[in-house]
Image (tube, coloured by chain):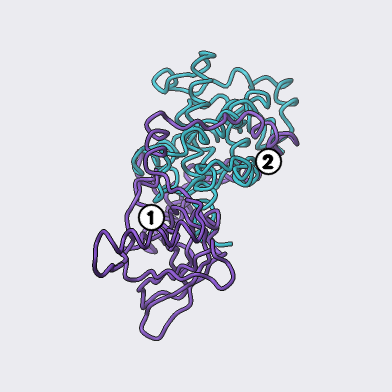
Amino acid sequence: MDKDDMRTEEYSVIKQCMDGNADIYAVLVERYKGMVYNIAYRMLGDTDSANDMAQEGFISAYIALKDFKKNSTFSTWLCSIVINKCRDHLRSKKATVSIDAIAEVSVSKIATPEEAACNRQIRHGIQTALNELPEEYREAVVLKHIEGLDYKEMKDILGINVNALKVRTYRGREMLKKLLKEGGLFNE
Amino acid sequence: MNRDMELIHRLLDGELSEEEKRDILIKIGSDPVLKNEFKEIEKAIHTAKNSDRLIAPASFTSDVMGRLPIRKDSHIKMAKDFLFRGRVLRWNMATALASVCLLIIVFAGVFQFKGKHDLITYTNAPGESNITTVRIDFYSPDAKKVAVAGDFNKWKVDENILKRQENGIWTIEIPLKPGKYNYMFVVDGKVWMTDPNAESYQDDGFGFKNSVLKVAKL
């Protein structure tokens, strides 16, 4: 199924949901649960919170289906909802770090040899590094390199112009590189 | 961020012209520091791209579906539905004949019926007095495929496909019970279009208009 066919089918599913056929929403949940769950996990760093926020995202999207615009894609719209949920969750935990506060990347959490040894699992290592990135850079790196989206899709999700997104992505990559290197990931 | 680093990032995104690409590759080749930066950033991207993906919990979909709220119509919508919703009237032949006679007497002349929509015609399907066959036409000479999706087929886009006539008009006949139906055309499987000749229109909740078709008992 190409993108246009998928968009047509999804629009049809949404119409049916709005007509009261809630069961068919499972089609969209099945299709996008992997993407949404992974984005939430990479943003939040733990599976329980990721599960909660991903589910919350689907439920909020369902409630707001009447606001979905036909000329956008459901996945993009859903991602923007889930990312906002993740942002709120991070703020509620006061876990964010402002960009200004990080002139130099702090690698204290992954710098010791003992911790570096524990981080030899790539998944854990990359997540540890992502957790250290400022929220804005983390969003850019997750969407661009883990979800493989292009800048236009990222713009639709994050509502930020492409040039600003590129700057965030470039800086995010450089910080990620430094964190992975100092965390021992490049020695594998 | 200096110019060379910006070019390295754009190179990694595949956004450089051939000339820019050649220039920065020469620089990378001749500058060990720049070469190291390039390799490390490339490696960081590779590491991120190839990190394992998690699988959502097995109960994820059922958990979400179990938490969906039940949709409730607003009071305004309920009032509108009460006032304007299509209704099916039950009748018998005696009542119908009496009504016709009354109309003839009252108007004492010719009773003309003219549909609002000259592209839709209504005829009784043989042997089914409560079913009306509705013909829906849509002019789209350049389309390769036209379907109609609406309340009558649960908005399925591949259930009612129109047949193309020689004059660029697409046609389908659908048996329907009396009532009010929202519908739209789906052109080439991707473009949703409102019927320009519909009897009336209704907001579809997405900022567009559904075409509305009312099927009355003849």
**Numbered disc 1: secondary structure:** strand
Q: How far from the left and from the top, in percent, is residue B120?
A: 38, 69
Looking at the image, which is closer to me, B165 or A1? Answer: B165
Q: How far from the left and from the top, in percent, is residue B176?
A: 52, 61
Q: Colour of chain B?
A: purple
Looking at the image, which is closer to me, B216 or B144? Answer: B216
Residue wearing tag 2:
B53
Please say if B36 is above or below B164.
Answer: above
Q: Quadrant of the C terminus of chain B?
A: bottom left
Disc 2 marks a residue whose amino acid type is Arg
Q: Indicate which label's residue lies in the foreground, 1 or 2.
A: 1
Q: Colour of chain A?
A: cyan
What is the number of the mark on residue B75?
A: none
Q: Residue at x 65, y 44 (%)?
A: A30
Same chain check for tags 1 and 2: yes
Residue wearing tag 1:
B212
Looking at the image, which is closer to me, A16 or B189? Answer: A16
Q: Quadrant of the N terminus of chain B?
A: top left
Disc 1 marks a residue whose amino acid type is Val
> With A72 as the anchor, is A34 left or right in this view?
right
Q: How far from the left and from the top, in percent, is residue B10?
A: 42, 50
Q: Residues within 10 Å of mark 1 (few under 14, many from 20)?
A: many
Q: Is residue A138 visible?
A: no
**Label 1 vs 2, first from the N-terminus:** 2
